[in-house]
Structures are given as structure tokens and as C-alpha cells.
Amino acid sequence: MTHDPGFTDHTIRHYADSPDMQKKLYKRSLLIIVLSQIFGGAGLASGVTVGALLAQEMLGKESFAGVPTALFTLGSAAAALLVGRFSERYGRRLGLSTGFFAGGLGALGVIWAAVTNNVALLFLSLLIYGAGSATNMQARYAGTDLAMPNQRAKAVSIAMVSTTLGAVAGPAMVDMTGDFAVSVGVPALGGPFILAAAAYTLAGLVFFIFLRPDPYIVAKAISAAQQSRDRRTDEERTTVHTSSNRGLVIGATVMILTQIVMIAIMTMTPVHMKHHGHSLGDVGLVIGVHIGSMYLPSLLTGALVDKIGREAMSIASGGVLLLAGVVAAAAPPDSLAVLLIALSLLGIGWNFGLISGTAIIVDSTDPATRAKTQGTIDVLIALSGASGGALSGMVVAHSSYATLSLAGGGLALLLIPVLIWSRRTSRAAAPAQDKQLES
């Protein structure tokens, strides 16, 4: 069964048997992902920008301002698992479109909660709204399904750059959407969620209408055909399986560590700046540069990951994150320029880690179970980011921002011994992998 209405098993097999058709579908899928990710980025950023302010306005207490982020992260983690499993069973088209539609539904719930001043509905809706963020991250894998090994990091980077376009536009339209919301009887802070609802719905429609035939289903058909021709011995299969499991551990470790370090330092930087007299404009500038550094270098990073290797760029991620931590710790509290450099380095280090780690995961998974595995790993990434954000406040409360920054940089250094271990243990698997390529 293809689980792709409108495309028969014969049509899917036709794609699976034709390298030329696969190349065309790969390029077409990337274009669809670019368009959808622009909408998805706008949906993600526009709502996140004012979520905490909306909760504070409705509850009248600053102590609850962090609740939206917690609910959003929890919803994102749960949705990553569900979208991954749904995509594995029914394909990327239905999995990703359903996730985006759920995010749009959550945004509509937030709007209604703002109109009725219903706090319980607000919290439930924010939980559902997190599905959009999870789907936005899962979409980066869709471009890799039919990519050659030396194209996978580039495919991830294209999706990430596309997200940036929407993520920049969303917050820039806060005032405009706020004015529109007031004109239709919705509180001003509900305006960005109107944009989020529309953007997530459009992102889902792009996938649902245009991502056909489903590249993931075609990739599974290709894998099934290759397995039927597999002439490896049981020992060779065991060796390759062990190598794949090791790759999953390495890829997940790279992305989890970079996520913890990035979220921890980023979360406390605005607090640190406000305590030392910086204006909200300064804070916005630093965080804006940081977010730009997280996504804008993606095309260059993708090319480097494919050209010089996943491990080399993962090690570079650890080095750049360490440098970011040292610069942030050494920055004079009143120096905006040094903090800009530190947070820019932090974004670049995260970018290196996410793209190289994602490429390692794709390299190490079989198409038959790839989507479920990717969803599970994204759950761990989301939860690790939430943990990093929560622990960062405790570290600063009991010590200092400098201590947090140095601790984050030190944690990033763990990537180096992990990757050295990976390189040493992979040598034993090289002969079996060479035989696999020859067959």
C-alpha cells in the first residue's frame, strides 16, 4: 500500500525504478518545502513573539509569563513524536500537513481565548499550537528523502533558510496584525495569532496539495527494492546495523548538546542585559542577530557538511559554541558590541550542530523506519532545550551569567571526545560498508 491517494503502487514503483524521475521529484519537493517553510516560519515566530505578553495580560501576573513557553515546548515535543509516526505510516504529505493544520487550530484557540478571556482555553490552545513548531522542524527531513548522500545537508539547509524568511516577517508584522485584530474585536495581542493561524494553514495546504507523489513513500519503495537484491551475509548486516545505531547516538548527541547550550545562554541573555541597564531595543537587536545567525548561514553550512564531512562540522560546532561561551562570559556588562558577537557565535555554533547532526541521522536511518526515528529524536531535542532554559535560570540565580556561559561552552566541548570515539569505532565497520557499496 502506498497510502498516497491518487498515486497507485504501479506509479510509485515507476518513480522508484527511474533515477531521472527521482531527481525531478527531489527538486520539486525542495521547492514545495521552501514555500511551505516560509509560511511555517511566519506562523512560528509571530505567535511566539507575544505569547508571554498575552498570558501576562490575561493573568495579571508576571510570574506566569513563562507558562506559554513551557506549554509550547511540551506541545512541540508531543507533536514531534506523533508527526513522525504519522509520517512513517502515511507519508510526509499527510504527516506534515496534519501537523501544520493542528498548529493553525491551536492559534485559532488562542484567539478565541483572548476574546473570551478564558485562561484554561489559552493554555490548552498553546499546547496544540506547539504542533506547528514541531512540524516546522520535521519538514527539514522531507527534503532529504530522495537526496543523494552528498546532497542531504544542503537539503536541510534549504529548509532552514526558508524558515528564516517567514520568521523575520512574522515579528515585523506584530503592530499591523495588532491593529487588524482590534478592528475585528480581538485584543491587540491576539493579532499575531491571526497571522499564525493563516500561515500554518497555508503551510499545511501547500504540503497536502502539492507534495505528490510523496517523496518518503518513493524512498521506501527504493529501499524495499534494494533490500530484495541484498546479497550481504548476516555478519555484514550486523556490522552495518551496529554502525547505523552508533550514527543515531552521535547525531542525537550533537543536536541535543548544541540545543542545551544555545537555549541556556540565549534564555538568560535578555535578563542579564536588562539587569545592566540595556534598553529593550538593545535586547531585541541582540536576539535578532542571534536568530539570524542560527538560520542565515545554513546554505554555506550545508555545503560544508556535505563537502568536508559531518564529523568535522560537528567538532567545529563544539569549538564555536565554546568560543561563544567564553566571549559572553568575558563581555563587559555594558558592552552591546561584545554581546552581539557572543550571541552571533552562539547561533552559528547551533547552526553547525543542527545541520551536521541532522545529516548524520539521515545517513544512519533506513527509509522504512526513518520518520518515526526522526520524530523521536526531535522529542529529545525539544525536551533538552526546555531543560536548558529551566536550568539556566537556576545557574544564574545561584552564580552568574558568566558562570552559565562558561559552563555552556564547556558542555559543548563534550562533542569532541564523543566524535573521536565515533571515528575510532567506525574503523571496524569500514570493511563491511565497503562490501555493501560494492554489492
Image (cartoon, rainbow, N blue to C red):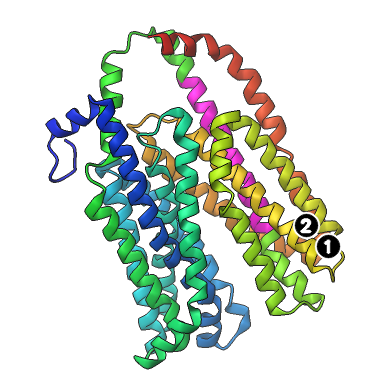
Secondary structure beneath disc 1?
loop
Q: Is residue 250 visible?
A: yes
- The kind of residue tagged 1 is Ser
Residue 332 % position (x, y): 87, 65
Q: Main secondary structure of the magenta part?
A: helix
Foreground of the two, 223 or 410? 223
Foreground mark, 2 or 1?
Answer: 2
Query: What's the residue at 17%, 28% (across, down)?
Result: 14
Q: Is residue 299 left or right of residue 323?
A: left
Label 2 sits on a secondary structure element that is helix
Relative to 243, residue 53 above or below: below
| Total marks placed | 2
- Graded by Cα atoms within 10 Å as few (under 14), some (14 to 19) or many (20 or more), the crowding at tag 2 reads many
Q: Residue 281 versus residue 380: which sits nearer the camera?
A: 281
Kindly identify the residue that appears in the image at 45 percent across and 28 percent down: 149
Which stretch is magenta?
Answer: 241-264
The reply to whether callout 2 and callout 1 are in contact (CB within 8 Å) is yes
Q: Is residue 259 located in the magenta-colored stretch of the structure?
A: yes
Report the quarter where the C terminus lies: top left
Q: Which mark is residue 399?
A: 1
Whole-percent x, y for residue 11 in the image? 15, 33
Q: Residues within 10 Å of mark 1 (few under 14, many from 20)?
A: few
Quadrant position of the N terminus in the picture: top left
Residue wearing tag 2: 404
Q: Residue 191, how many percent across, how many down?
A: 42, 82
- Which image quarter: residue 204? bottom left
Chain-order first, disc 2 or disc 1: 1
